[in-house]
Amino acid sequence: MNKTILVTGTAGFIGYHLAEQLIAEGHRVIGVDIVCDYYPVAIKRARLARLGRHGDAFVPVEANLCDYETLSAVFAEHKPSHVCNLAAQAGVRYSIEKPFVYQKANLEGFLNILECCRHNDTERLVYASSSSVYGGNTKLPFSESDSVDSPVSLYAATKKANELMAHCYTHLYGLQTVGLRFFTVYGPWGRPDMALWIFTEKILRGRPIPVFNHGKMKRDFTYVADIIAGVCGSLFQDGLNPYEVFNLGNHRSELLMDMIGLIETAVGKEAELNLLPMQPGDVPASFADVELAGKKLGFKPTTPISKGIPEFCNWYMEHPELAAVAEQWRGA
């Protein structure tokens, strides 16, 4: 049965891909986004323009989640059966520079979503958490049963707070909530503030790339199509508990240097490395245990970085207009 689904953050990377998939499956998407300038608005507008090709199946709403009255009106008008909250202020390092932005978007904005779901009989709320909640944990892979009481960035703390807030609304009001701890999502239409875009840009232009922890970083790089499969499962899978939290990752912890090597091969140029120490708020490694998501959601990531990294690089080289916008924004 086709449904009306409210997705926040549809001008963003994951939100755009989710909206495309939901529309392809026959659903109607109400896309809420403030279209902020954390990175170039032109990239976000380009994503929204592609969604606009779907006509009435995509309803764009430009609004701030902190504007409760507007958000309430959107819920009242469209009556979504399911909500997926992907809107948030992203970035571990940026949270050190701009902490109050995270207070507004990630805490106040999420509270407004919870309140709107509660007052509009929403069947299920799925929301983005983050692998960063595991903080300084050294046991790998990270499991949902691990303690997440030691965040090392404000961004991570706001994501842990989202999980606690959701638990409260499930307990008090019976709202079914599913939190998703994403692990380093990448792919076409990705974010220009993330390492993959930055490295590809600089390698192509013969500029040194910043490599933190002297190249000893490891990440569970997860291709966006695999993430979207997990999000869709979280929205529609039967038999879930009233409150759930799942890891969505690739179940592989890859060396950053291996990612760089794949970019070099894909673009046909060698990287110049600027080896740097670990940055505040960062962690040396991430690695997702996805057994629980596999069992309850049927989640099974299928895209290795040997396939996904070239896919991104090809997309990047096919969109010089977006590459130029990001480069200008970076002041390069």
Image (cartoon, grey):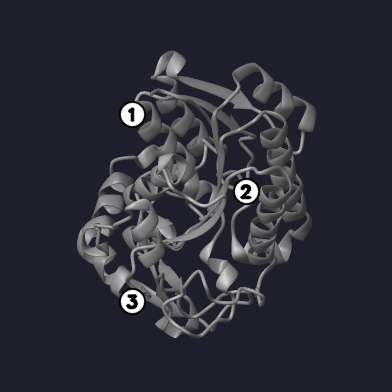
Q: Mark yes or no: residue 8 visible.
A: no
Q: Mark yes or no: residue 140 visible.
A: yes
Going from the N terminus, do you reach mark 3 or mark 1 first? 1
Q: Do the residues labelled 2 and 3 touch (CB within 8 Å)?
A: no
Closer to the camera, 163 or 244?
244
Q: How far apart are marks 1 and 2 (CA)?
A: 25 Å
Along the horizontal axis of the image, is 161 left or right of 318?
Answer: right
Disc 1 packing (10 Å; few <14; some 14–19; many ≥20): few
Q: Distance between the residues labelled 3 and 1?
A: 37 Å
Q: What element carries label 2?
A: loop
The vertical placement of 181 against 177, above or below, is below
Q: Label 1: which residue?
A: 25
Q: Label 2: which residue?
A: 88
x%, y% of residue 284?
A: 49, 80
Along the horizontal axis of the image, is 1 left or right of 282?
Answer: left
Going from the N terminus, do you reach mark 1 or mark 2 first? 1
The vertical placement of 82 against 252, above or below, is above
- Mark 1 vs mark 2: in front: 1
Disc 2 packing (10 Å; few <14; some 14–19; many ≥20): many
Q: Which amino acid does label 1 sit on?
A: Glu
Residue at point 56% right, 68% down?
132
Q: Do the residues labelled 1 and 2 touch (CB within 8 Å)?
A: no
Q: Which amino acid does label 3 sit on?
A: Met
x%, y% of residue 222?
A: 36, 59
x%, y% of residue 166?
A: 66, 52
Residue at point 69% right, 52% down?
171
- Mark 3 vs mark 1: in front: 1
Q: Which amino acid does label 2 sit on?
A: Ala
Disc 3 packing (10 Å; few <14; some 14–19; many ≥20): some
x%, y% of residue 253?
A: 35, 74
Q: How far apart are marks 2 and 3 (CA)?
A: 29 Å
